[in-house]
Image (cartoon, rainbow, N blue to C red):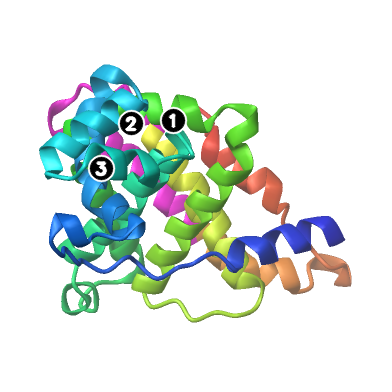
Amino acid sequence: MRAAKLYLMSMDQTDSTPPQAHQPAPDDLTLDEARSALAPHLPMNAAFDGWTPEAVEMAAGSAGIDPEIAKLAFKGGAMDMIDAWIEWTDAEMARRLPPEELDAMKIRDKIRSMIETRLDIAAPDKEALRRAMAVQAMPQNLPRTARIAWRSADRMWRMAGDTATDYNHYTRRMTLTAVYGSTLTVFLNDDSEDFADTRAFLSRRIDNVMQFEKAKAQWTGKGAGGSRERLSLSRFIGRLRYPAR
């Protein structure tokens, strides 16, 4: 339990502030700024070349950035590239869903809108996404993959107005990570019009999350006969990722 708690604390310490749009002259870019500028150009090239130095070189040409600077920006390889793309996706999601629009929605609609917006952003680059998820699933990349997923989930919950600091802070991010991950898996294989099958799947998973929020009262309350009932968080998250058919 102590190890799990320390892991969750390390997740919570990741930077949850979406990157700000800033585009100085190409010759004046820092490496962080170069990564941000290159990020939206990477997937269209990664779809053909994979998440490789060749994709970085092609993206540099599209963005008008010195290829040598681009190489330095992604000297960590594929995971650096994927991380930058997801950072850009976080920022683009926030741009498309300003606070005044989200404030008018219920929580479930906020979460649905944010995930659907992310799917819309990724839709032109499904092959790049498929390749990215394969890279992320490699054993050596799993810790960083988990940190990146937690960061995005944290940003979404903060955009939704979540201010919890107790165990709800962690359970909400864990469940959202599971929902989003399983939705991406369906999305990659969805050929329905306007990804209708994925949207229906997402709605069902969000219904599960809302049921979970209601069940939390039982998790810490007393059940029949005075015995304390406990909800298995790991079992619930497993069902989100691998729902019964």
Q: Which mark is residue 133?
A: 1
Amino acid residing under circle 1:
Met
| Marks 1 and 2, how far apart at CA | 6 Å
The amino acid on which the numbered mark 2 sits, given as a three-letter code, is Leu
Residue in view at x 21 percent, y 44 percent:
40
Which residue position is annotated with label 3?
119
- Looking at the picture, which amino acid does disc 3 mark? Leu
Whole-percent x and y of residue 10? 66, 63
Q: Residue 209, how many percent across, how many down?
A: 49, 56
Instruction: Give the structural element (helix, strand or loop) at label 1.
Output: helix
The prevailing secondary structure element of the residues shown in magenta is helix
Q: CB under 8 Å between callouts 1 and 2?
A: yes
Q: Is residue 203 magenta?
A: yes
Which span of residues is magenta-colored? 185-210
What is the C-alpha distance between the residues marked 3 and 1? 14 Å
For the residue pair 157 and 207, the one nearer the viewer reads as 157
- Where on the picture, by quarter, is residue 167? bottom right
Q: Is residue 220 above or below residue 199?
A: below
Q: Identify the image quadrant of the N terminus.
A: bottom right
Identify the image quadrant of residue 63. top left
Of tags 2 and 3, which is closer to the observer? 2
Distance Cα–Cα, label 2 vs label 3: 10 Å
Q: Residue 220 at x, y = what percent?
A: 74, 72
Position of 189 with respect to 8 (left or right) is left
Picture coordinates of residue 120, whole percent (x, y): 19, 43
Q: Look at the numbered disc 2 and give the secondary structure of its residue.
A: helix
